[in-house]
Amino acid sequence: MLVGISGGSGVVYGVRLLQVLKELKIESHLIMTTAATETLVLETDHKVSDVESIASVSYRINDIAAPPASGSFRTRGMVVIPCSMKTLAGVANGYSDNLLLRAAEVTMKEKRLLVLVPRETPLSRIHIENMLRASDAGALILPAMPAFYPKPKTIEGMVDFLVGKVLDTLGIERDLYQRWTGPPGTHQK
């Protein structure tokens, strides 16, 4: 599984996805942008080396010759979590000037699942148009919008909800959140 972490706020989502993939013994290949490494230090207590060590393999952002730059490198798909608006614009417009963007482009051209997790608010018309363009090209847009029906009690609970939704889109079973079954007492006999 390719995991891209770009510079948008919410790097904790990407870190948690890597942790869960490791727990599930799913090989993960990490690509972090330069802005992501800065955001990681600002938003968490993690070091870049700590996050890289969670992944099975980690690549430098400018290593355009790395395996994920080629369609012959087989993956289950790719998740960009969080996906900054700059990264979204690159994906939506075919501007692949770094390994993360090239890997996303390869994922789409090979008809593999590309999940983009934008974390920005409010959204400008340009952001919305870029999401539509990326969606039309085959990406799945999964905004970082936690639900509150599971009644999360911690930030970790909110993060697990979103990571669980990402895993659902990839067809990976993991019980990270309480699924909606309807209002209490409505389906019981």
Image (cartoon, grey):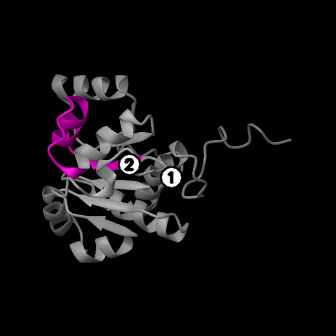
Q: Are marks 1 and 2 in contact (CB under 8 Å)?
A: no
Please indicate, yes or no, whether residue 8 appears anywhere in the rendered image: no
Q: Nearer the viewer, mark 1 or mark 2?
A: 2
| Picture quadrant where residue 109 is located | top left
In the structure shown, which secondary structural element does the residue marked by tag 1 occupy? helix
- Horizontal side of residue 164 vs 139, given as left or right: right
Dot 1 surroundings within 10 Å: few (below 14), some, or many (20 or more)? many
Please state which of residues 12 and 99 is positioned toward the viewer in this rendering: 99
| Picture quadrant where residue 117 is located | top left
Q: Is residue 95 magenta?
A: yes
**Segment tinted magenta in the rendering:** 78-99
Instruction: Say which quadrant the N terminus sits in.
Output: bottom left
Q: Earlier in the sequence, mark 1 or mark 2?
A: 2
Please state which of residues 99 and 15 is positioned toward the viewer in this rendering: 99
Instruction: Report the residue marked by disc 2.
Output: 79
- Please, what is the three-letter code of the amino acid marked with disc 1? Gly
User: Cα distance, mark 1 to mark 2?
Assistant: 13 Å
- Please, what is the three-letter code of the amino acid marked with disc 2? Val
Instruction: Report the residue marked by disc 1.
Output: 164
Q: Is residue 72 above or below residue 67?
A: above
